[in-house]
Amino acid sequence: MFSRITQKWFKIDLEAIQDWLDEHKNLLIRVIVILGLAGYLFLLPRYAIGKHRIPQMIIFATLGIGGLAVLISQPVLATLLIIPATLLVPFGIGTGTQSNLNAGILMVLACAGLWVLEMIVVHKKISIIRSRPFLPLFLLMVSSVISLGFGQLPWFNMPHASMASQIGGMMMYILAGLTFLVAAHRLSLPSLKWAVVLFLGLGSIYLFLRPLTNRYYSLVYPVVSLFEQGATGSMFWIWILNISVGQLIFNHRMPLLLKIGLGGILLAFFYNSLVLGREWTSGWLPPLLGASAIIFVGFRRTRILIGVFALTAIIATFPSLQSTVMGGNEYSLVTRTEAWEILLKVVQVNPIFGVGPANYYFYTPIFPIRGYYVQFNSHNNYMDLLVQTGIVGLGLFIWFMTEQSILGLRMMTKVPEGFAKGLVYGIFGGTIGTIVAGMFGDWVIPFVYNVGFNGFRASILGWFFMGGLVALEQTFQSQEGK
């Protein structure tokens, strides 16, 4: 229905645009060439007198043009490049605030823009594949824009966030949706294999070398430091564990050597998260709960036995388990609970659509927390959703995650043995881990004044692979139709 509506809306305009482009193609080429030459003629004399860093600008411009040509000619390759750009590329564009649009975000925007441009210019229609998670996700993106509008109202006698910060907060929702949509429309089974190889290959380098940093600093740190700040947040650990577990257990066609490699990734994960980073609960509890969900749904005949065994183990080791999970964060839990109570007071002024992206950070000093009038954030994605986008936004997010989880369960019986089945289980576990991670911080849709754009690097990974599940759905639906 959504596809038919968009086609109806855009039909006349798209045909007119195409006709105009065809008629004026030669003129447009001449204009672009003339503007390019004019730019060079303008900049070169200024470089001679030291007013511009022309070499860098020329290099970036040349690389940009070459990269754009690759993106246009190889859209699937461009989509795959989101992963290394997210993890490794330090380049970013300033926004006029303290945050930059990093390489991962720029790649998502470039891929999304080219996808839309291809539909308009080449296919001459807006074509969105049908999948149940799309509707709540699209509505969530729309609701974030609506909440931005409500954020301009004077809810309290306090200044709200700057417009740049509010737009940045809204863009988190838009970027999450665009990442999902691009992956769903561009990827296929072969390209998903490459995506998994890229992610596990690059991620394993980090997992294996990170523990060696202190002992072999001069050798190891230059490599580990290549991974950008924010790229190894909670979502990185969730998805590298669950994709590995899914492939190791349910890809029965995997060669023994690759299984040994995945076993090494799992060992490195457990050492990094449970030995080196045990106090950081977001780094190991959501991933492990996601992996537990994979095992629970994957072994249907023994799931009751597994559940009883797990429950017994939890009860028997509860005191030590509680200490491990809390990691000395009891005070943090108490203060977070009090912070959530204050945020519930803030959202009462507009419970339907919230007080707008980023704004509540400036409203919190109205209410004292432990006797202090300070700015703070919720450290919880669900509370962020409620306060920023209201009941509507929170409800749409829960609806989306529910549809995504159901799709994963449904796809388990539709894909054949091998890589596809392992990936479906891995994405299902990653989705469950992502749902859990939202309780421990703003890892899924970052809050602009906390995890922010830097942390969105790791968030991209989750939205990318969740979109990959829809790509798998379309692949095997088309095969069934044939």
Image: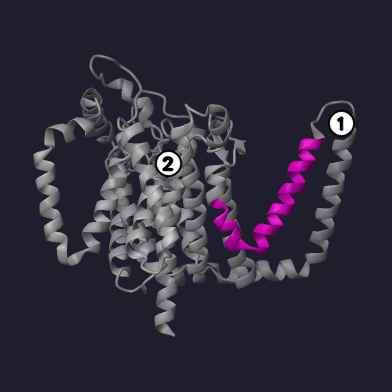
Camera-side residue: 351 or 209? 209
Question: Magenta part mainly helix, strand or loop?
Answer: helix
Camera-side residue: 127 or 57? 57
Quadrant of residue 148 within the rendered picture: top left
Residue at the image position 73 percent from the left and 53 percent from the top? 66
The numbered mark at residue 46 is 1
Quadrant of residue 11 within the rendered picture: bottom right
Residue at the image position 32 percent from the left and 65 percent from the top? 407
Q: Is residue 395 visible?
A: no
Asked if residue 318 lies left or right of residue 252, the reply is left
Give the mark count: 2
Residue type, mark 2 in image = Leu
Residue at the image position 58 percent from the left and 43 percent from the top? 103
Residue type, mark 1 in image = Arg
Quadrant of the frame with the C terminus? bottom left
Q: Is residue 447 magenta?
A: no
The magenta segment: 55-82
Quadrant of residue 51 within the rendered picture: top right
Q: Is residue 408 visible?
A: yes
Q: Is residue 68 magenta?
A: yes
The numbered mark at residue 148 is 2
SS state under label 2? helix
Camera-side residue: 10 or 133? 133
Quadrant of the frame with the N terminus? bottom left
SS state under label 1? helix
